[in-house]
Image (cartoon, rainbow, N blue to C red):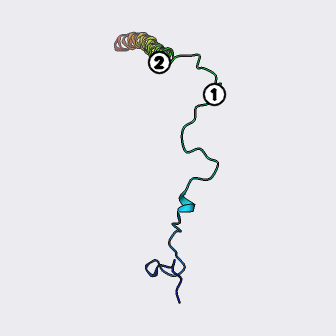
């Protein structure tokens, strides 16, 4: 005689999962709906203030990055002008 929970299509030793209603029900003692907590601390910072702070920080970081990039570019341009003038001096001195 074969076991009722044994499915011949699943192969030997493989069984269907149990589907009794008691195993699917919520455990006793657990809430099944939202219950607000009484006496909780109120939020001190509003979402609008946090949003403004976040955007301000983002823009400050972006402007700082652009400023630093601009300064480095100016430094590189100045160094390039110096090197070009030195190359010109070498070419003029070498051609004589």
Q: Relative to residue 61, is residue 14 depicted above or below?
A: below
Q: Relative to residue 34, is residue 48 depicted above or below?
A: above
- The residue lying toward the viewer, choosing from 32 and 78, is 32
Q: Residue at x 34, y 14 (%)?
A: 95
Callout 1 secondary element: loop
Separation of residues labelled 2 and 1 (CA atoms): 28 Å
Query: Is tag 2's residue or tag 1's residue first in the polypeptide sequence?
Result: 1
Residue 36 percent across, percent down from the top left: 58, 31
- Choose top left, top right, bottom left or bottom right for residue 35: top right
Q: Residue furthest bottom?
A: 1
Reading the image, the residue beneath label 1 is 38
Q: Quadrant of the C terminus?
A: top left
- The residue lying toward the viewer, choosing from 23 and 96, is 23
| Label at residue 46 | none
- Choose top left, top right, bottom left or bottom right for residue 78: top left
62 relative to 3 in the view: left or right: left
Reading the image, the residue beneath label 2 is 51
Q: Residue at x 60, y 20 (%)?
A: 42
Question: How dense is the environment of label 2, judged by Cα within 10 Å: few (below 14), some, or many (20 and up)?
Answer: few
Q: Relative to residue 43, is residue 14 depicted above or below?
A: below
Callout 2 secondary element: helix
Q: Residue at x 48, y 16 (%)?
A: 61
Residue 74 percent across, percent down from the top left: 42, 10
Residue 33 percent across, percent down from the top left: 54, 41
């Amino acid at each position: 005689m074969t076991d009722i929970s044994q499915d011949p299509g699943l192969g030997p030793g493989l069984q269907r999962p149990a589907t009794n209603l008691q195993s699917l029900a919520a455990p006793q003692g657990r809430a099944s709906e939202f219950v607000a907590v009484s006496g909780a601390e109120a939020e001190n910072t509003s979402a609008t203030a946090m949003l403004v702070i976040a955007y301000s920080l983002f823009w400050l970081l972006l402007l700082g990055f652009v400023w630093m990039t601009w300064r480095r570019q100016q430094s590189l341009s100045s160094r390039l002008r110096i090197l070009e003038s030195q190359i010109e001096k070498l070419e003029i001195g070498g051609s004589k």
